[in-house]
Amino acid sequence: MSRAALAILVVEDHPTIARQIVEFLDGLKWQTDHAATGALAIDLATRHVYDVVLLDLNLPDLDGLEVCRAIKERAPRNVPVLMLTARDAFEDKARGFNQGADDYLTKPFDLRELALRCEALARRGQLHVSQEMRLGPLTLLSREKRALFNGAPLPLTLVGFKILLMMCGAHPHAVSRSALMHELWGANPPDSDALKSHIYALRKQLEAAGALAMVVTIPLLGYRLELGAHV
C-alpha cells in the first residue's frame, strides 16, 4: 500500500542521525527539510507549512522545549510535534507534553515506527481542520471544495481552491512556493511553471468577484493573502 506524501521538518543536530532520518523519509517520497539548530527550526516552521515536526530536544543553541513552544505559537497552523530524545524519564516526557508536544519517541528508535507515528499525527492533525473556514469575506467549505466571497460562489478550479485554502490556513503568514507545489503535486511537480499560471488564474477569478489585490507575491518566498480593504 502506497503512503500519502507528507511534508516533514527534521530538527536534529547529530549529522549521522539526521542523515538516516532524512534518507529514510526521502525514500518514502516524502518532502523533508532539515534544521540543525533551534533558530533555523523556528524560522522554517514559521515560513512553511509542515504535516509534522520531528524535534530533537538536545540542540546546540536552544532547548528543544523552547523550540517546541515557539513553533506552536508561531507556525501558520497547529503542526503536530514529535519529540525525539534520549531523555526517557517521566518528568522529561511530562515537560515535553506541557510545552505542546504531541508525541514522544525515545532514541534509539526504529525508522519504520517513526514513519507510522508521523502518519498517525498527520491524520490526527487533519481531523482538527475545520470543514468550514471563514476569513473576512471568504468562506471555504473544504469538504465540498467550494469557496464563497461575500456569500456568493467563487468559480474556482480545484487547484485554485487548494491554493486559496492553504493561504487562508496560513493567514496572516505567507505560504512558500515549495509548500504549495508539494500540496498540489507531491513529489512530482510539473516541469513548467504551472504554479504561476494557477496563481494568475486565481487572481483573475477573485478580481472578477470584486476581490482586488487579494493574492500578494512575497519575493523569494511565495504568496500571502491580503484582506486589507476587504474587511
Image: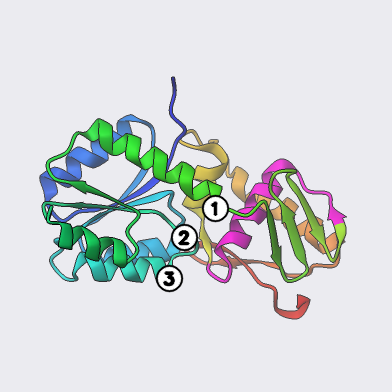
> Which structural element holds mark 2?
loop
Q: Position of residue 136 (x, y in %)?
A: 73, 71
Instruction: Indicate the quadrant where residue 159 lies.
Output: top right
Q: CA distance from mark 1 to mark 2?
A: 9 Å
Find the distance from the CA under tag 3 to the CA under tag 1: 18 Å
Q: Which three-letter amino acid code belongs to the residue tagged 1?
A: His
Question: Of the residues shown, which amino acid type is indicated by label 2?
Answer: Asn
**Local secondary structure at mark 1:** loop
Left or right relative to 46: residue 65: left
Instruction: Find out whether the residues at labels 3 and 1 contact each other: C-beta distance under 8 Å.
Output: no
| Label placed on residue 128 | 1
Quadrant of residue 172 within the rendered picture: bottom right
Q: In this image, 193 relative to 146: left or right?
A: left
Q: Check the picture and name the quadrant holding the N terminus.
A: top left
Mark 3 and mark 1 lie on one chain; the one further toward the N terminus is 3
Query: In this rendering, is residue 176 above or below 108?
Result: below
Region of the chain picked out in magenta, as a range: 153-173
**Which of the numbered marks, if any, corresponds to residue 78?**
2
Q: Nearer the viewer, mark 3 or mark 1?
A: 1
Q: Return the x and y of residue 56 as percentages of the image width and height.
A: 20, 56
Residue that appears at 61% across and 43% down: 194
How crowded pointer 2 is (Cα within 10 Å; few <14, some 14-19, many 20+) is rated as some
